[in-house]
Image: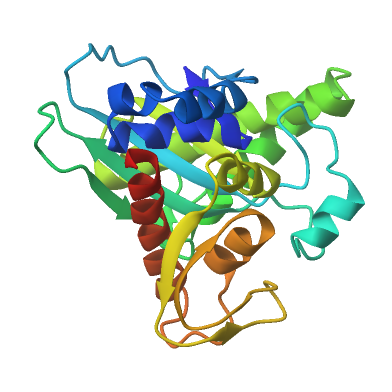
Amino acid sequence: MKIATVARAGARVLVVLASVGALIATGVAWSVQQHVTTTIVTSDAVTPHPVLIGQAFTALLVGLDARTDANGNPLPPALLDAIHAGPDEGQLHTDTIILLHVPALPGEPAVAVSIPRDSYVSLADGSGKHKINSAYNRGLVAAEQELKAQGVAGPELDKRGREAGRTALIATVESLTGTSIDHYAEINLAGFVELTDAIGGVPVCLNKPVHDTYSGVDLPAGYQTVSGPVALAFVRQRHGLDGGDLDPIARQQAFIAGLTQRLQS
């Protein structure tokens, strides 16, 4: 099953919201496609549910607060500073969790449901109720303890630990929602920056100016196109918003809508 801990495969998953045929038909789309499919990371975290072309499917889209790339290598400090990643607390939290259902018929709308990161749920590992955004990290830590005892270290340890983390999160979401997940897409901080740069930015519209030193967002009111670190700051802002964690969810949904419009154009 194909996943994306960098932007490239994330674009492939999100493109199901648009017309793939129309996207590939242009020269610009061809160049974007070449950029986003250069590196595809695969995973066995999803239990295979055969989905034929033309059938409905459900995907889990995850934004991971990771300071390493898909191969477990640390991201450059200069990049982390540019995207206002903040201090590394040593925990891989899934701060964005979106369950996306794509219907079989082209005319039917896709449905995306966001799961708040601080929702207390029963984790699939049997450890009781915890915040759902900790399921990934708890699965990773448990697996790494066993792997270290076997002598596994370095990037390989990180890679295999993450695989266990994905499996734990998927099992928890399936148990919570009663839905079988057919596909999984994961994107980290740097990958999100690459994704928005690859498609030339995403249109957003703000009712009022926003400024937040934590996320690094500093944008005027009105319609504008954001990309790279600015786009990341836009979807990561949590401080100074009236609705708490629900406001970032609304922004993420609006951002995906803008991303879809960008791909369709």
| Residue at the spot 42% in from the left edge and 58% down from the top edge | 255
Which sits in the foreground, 134 or 74?
Answer: 74
Residue 174 horizontal side relative to residue 132, left or right: left
Please provide percent x and percent y for residue 8.
Answer: 58, 30
4 on left or right of 144 = left
Do we see residue 53 in this rendering? yes
At which x and y percent is residue 117? 48, 61
- For the question of whether residue 4 can be seen, the reply is no
| Lateral position of residue 119 relative to residue 136, left or right | left
Percent x, y of residue 161: 70, 30
Q: Is residue 217 left or right of residue 258?
A: right
Residue at the image position 76 percent from the left and 65 percent from the top: 84
Q: Residue furthest front?
A: 27
**Is 188 placed above or below 234 here?**
above
Picture layout, residue 181 above or below residue 211: above
Residue closest to the eye, 239 or 261: 261
Identify the residue at image location x=47%, y=17%.
1
Asked which colour scheme the image uses, the reply is rainbow
Figure label count? 0
Quadrant assignment for the C terminus: top left
Please tell me which residue lies in front, 117 or 236.
236
Instruction: Give the x, y percent position of residue 242.
Output: 44, 88
Looking at the image, residue 172 lies above or below residue 167:
below
At horizontal 80% and vertical 60% (from top left) the residue drawn is 82
